[in-house]
Image (cartoon, helix red, strand yellow):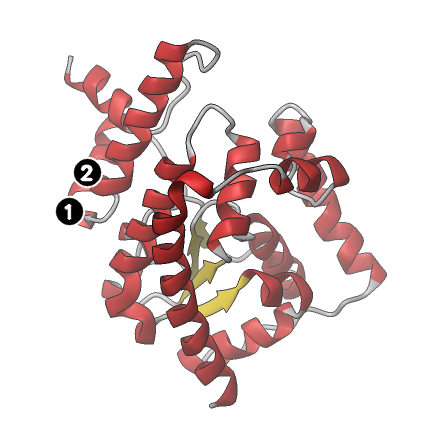
C-alpha cells in the first residue's frame, strides 16, 4: 500500500494521459513531486524505497552533477561533456529536483546548474508533455530555482544559449571553480556528429516522436510559438525575475 502511494507521488507511467482523469492525476503527482523535491532528507529515501533513479543520484564517487529544470539542455550538456573528455565520467543528472544540487553541495561534489528563459523552457516542456499545464510547469520552475538561490555561489551556473553554443567556456568555469582539469570541447565535425548520435539514440529510445526530440526541429519550434501564456502572466513574470538574477550571477562569473 505504501509503495503504491509513493509511486503516485513520484514520476511514473501509471496514469493514462488521454483521459481527463489521467491528466489531472499526472498534474497532481507532478505538483507533489515538485514540492518534496526541495528536501534531500525526504526525496532520496523515497527514491530508494520505491527503487527509482538509484544510478542517477549523486554519491561520494560522483565526479560531476548536472541539473536544471527540464528542457534546459541537460541531455546535450551531459553528452557534450562526455564527448569532450574522451573517457567515461561519472555524472549524476536528470533528476530535475533542487534537492540533487543541494545534496551535491553538501557532499562537496562539483555541480553545474543549468537555466533557460522560463518561456522557452516551459514551452518546450509543454510540447513534450502536452497533458500537463503551464501553471504546473511554471510552479516547478519557481520552486527549483528559488530553492537553489542560497547555493548559487557554490555551483557553476550556465545559461541554455551558452551551453548549446560555447560549451567550452562552461567547462572552463567548472575547472576554475572546482580546481579541475577537464578537457574543453573541440567543435570538430566528428565531435558534433558524436553528440548528435547520442541525442538521436535517446530520441529512438522514447519512441522517436518529433515533439519529444532532444534536438531542435521546425515542428517543435512551431508548436512552442503557439503556446499562450496570457492566463499565467503573473507567474511567468516571477519566473523571469528569477532568471534575470541567475543571469546576473553568470555574467559576474564570466568576468571574474
Residue 186, how many percent across, how many down? 74, 70
Question: Which residue is located at x 42 percent, y 19 percent?
Answer: 13
Q: Is residue 87 visible?
A: no
Question: Which residue is located at x 23 percent, y 41 percent?
Answer: 35
Q: Is residue 189 visible?
A: yes
Question: Mark 2 — residue?
Answer: 45
Badge 1 crowding class, 10 Å Cα cut-off, few under 14, some 14 to 19, many 20 or more, is: few
Q: Are marks 1 and 2 in contact (CB under 8 Å)?
A: yes
Question: Which residue is located at x 36 percent, y 22 percent?
Answer: 26
Task: Determine whether, in the image, residue 56 is placed left or right of residue 211.
Answer: left
Q: As displayed, is residue 38 above or below residue 248?
A: above
Residue 95, how many percent across, how many down? 39, 44
Residue 79, how many percent across, how many down? 62, 52
Question: Which residue is located at x 69 percent, y 27 percent?
Answer: 208
In the foreground, 75 or 85: 75
Question: Mark 1 — residue?
Answer: 41
| Secondary structure beneath label 2 | helix
Return the residue found at the far right.
189
Amino acid at each position: 500500500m505504501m509503495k503504491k502511494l509513493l509511486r503516485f507521488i513520484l514520476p511514473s507511467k501509471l496514469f493514462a494521459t488521454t483521459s481527463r482523469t489521467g491528466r489531472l492525476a499526472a498534474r497532481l503527482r507532478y505538483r507533489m513531486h515538485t514540492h518534496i523535491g526541495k528536501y534531500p532528507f525526504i526525496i532520496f529515501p523515497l527514491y530508494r524505497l520505491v527503487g527509482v533513479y538509484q544510478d542517477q543520484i549523486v554519491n561520494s564517487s560522483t565526479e560531476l552533477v548536472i541539473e536544471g529544470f527540464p528542457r534546459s539542455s541537460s541531455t546535450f550538456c551531459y553528452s557534450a561533456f562526455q564527448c569532450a573528455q574522451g573517457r567515461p565520467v561519472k555524472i549524476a543528472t536528470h533528476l530535475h529536483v533542487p534537492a540533487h544540487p543541494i545534496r551535491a553541495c553538501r557532499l562537496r561534489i562539483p555541480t553545474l546548474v543549468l537555466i533557460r528563459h522560463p518561456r522557452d523552457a516551459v514551452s518546450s516542456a509543454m510540447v513534450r508533455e502536452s497533458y500537463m499545464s503551464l501553471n504546473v510547469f511554471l510552479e516547478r520552475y519557481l520552486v527549483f530555482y528559488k530553492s537553489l538561490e542560497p547555493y548559487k555561489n557554490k555551483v557553476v551556473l550556465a545559461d541554455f544559449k551558452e551551453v548549446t553554443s560555447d560549451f567550452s567556456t562552461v567547462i572552463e568555469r567548472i575547472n576554475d571553480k572546482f580546481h579541475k582539469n577537464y578537457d574543453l570541447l573541440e567543435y570538430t565535425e566528428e565531435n558534433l556528429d558524436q553528440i548528435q548520435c547520442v541525442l538521436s539514440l535517446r530520441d529512438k529510445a522514447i519512441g522517436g516522436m518529433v515533439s519529444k526530440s532532444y534536438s531542435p526541429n521546425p515542428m517543435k519550434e512551431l508548436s512552442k510559438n503557439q503556446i499562450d501564456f496570457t492566463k499565467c502572466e503573473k507567474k511567468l513574470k516571477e519566473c523571469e525575475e528569477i532568471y534575470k538574477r541567475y543571469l546576473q550571477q553568470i555574467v559576474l562569473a564570466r568576468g571574474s
